[in-house]
Image (cartoon, rainbow, N blue to C red):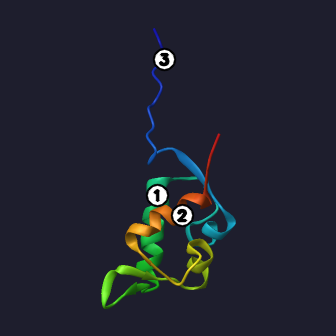
Amino acid sequence: MAETKKKTDGLNRPVQPSPELGAVVGTKPLTRAEVVSAMWAYIKKNSLQDPANKRDILADAKLAKVFGKDKVTMFEMNKLISPHLKPVG
C-alpha cells in the first residue's frame, strides 16, 4: 500500500519570515496564508488602514522595513512580502 503524501499548494507550504517580517508576524515558520492573516491582524490592531480609503495601508516603522515605503495598497502587500519569505525544507 502506497503512503499518501499530503499535497500542499503555495498558500499552505511552510515559509520562514525574514527578520524584518518576523518583527510583525513572529519568527517561526508559517504558511503564506498564516502570514497574510497575521499581517492583517497587525494592521487592524494598530489601526494602520487609511480611514479615507480602507484599501490603503499606512506603514508604521516595522511595516516600512518590510514594504520599503510608507503607504501601500492591500493588493501590493502580498507582492511586497514575497521577498521576505523563504521556503522551509
Quarter of the image containing the N terminus? top left
Residue furthest to the right:
19
- Amino acid identity at mark 2: Ile
| Helix, strand or loop for disc 3 | loop
* Residue 13 position within the rendered picture, expressed as x and y whole percent measured from the top left: 51, 44
| Helix, strand or loop for disc 2 | helix
Q: Which residue is located at x 46 percent, y 68 percent?
A: 77
Count residues near mark 2 (Cα–Cα under 10 Å), then give few for <14, some for 14-19, many for 20+.
many
Count residues near mark 3 (Cα–Cα under 10 Å), then give few for <14, some for 14-19, many for 20+.
few
- Taking 83 as reference, is 64 above or below it? below
Residue furthest to the top:
1
**As rendered, which of 64 and 42 lies closer to the eye?**
64
Count residues near mark 1 (Cα–Cα under 10 Å), then give few for <14, some for 14-19, many for 20+.
some
Left or right: where 39 falls relative to 66: left
- Amino acid identity at mark 1: Glu
- Taking 31 as reference, is 58 above or below it? below
| Helix, strand or loop for disc 1 | helix
Which one is earlier in the sequence, the residue at label 2 or at label 1?
A: 1
Label 2 or label 1, whichever lies nearer to me, is: 2
Q: Which residue is located at x 63 percent, y 76 percent?
A: 65
Q: Which residue is located at x 40 percent, y 79 percent?
A: 44
Marks 3 and 1: CB-CB under 8 Å?
no
Q: Which residue is mark 3?
A: 3
What mark, if any, has residue 34 been given in the picture? 1
Quarter where residue 83 is shown: bottom right
What mark, if any, has residue 81 been given in the picture? 2
What mark, if any, has residue 46 been given in the picture? none
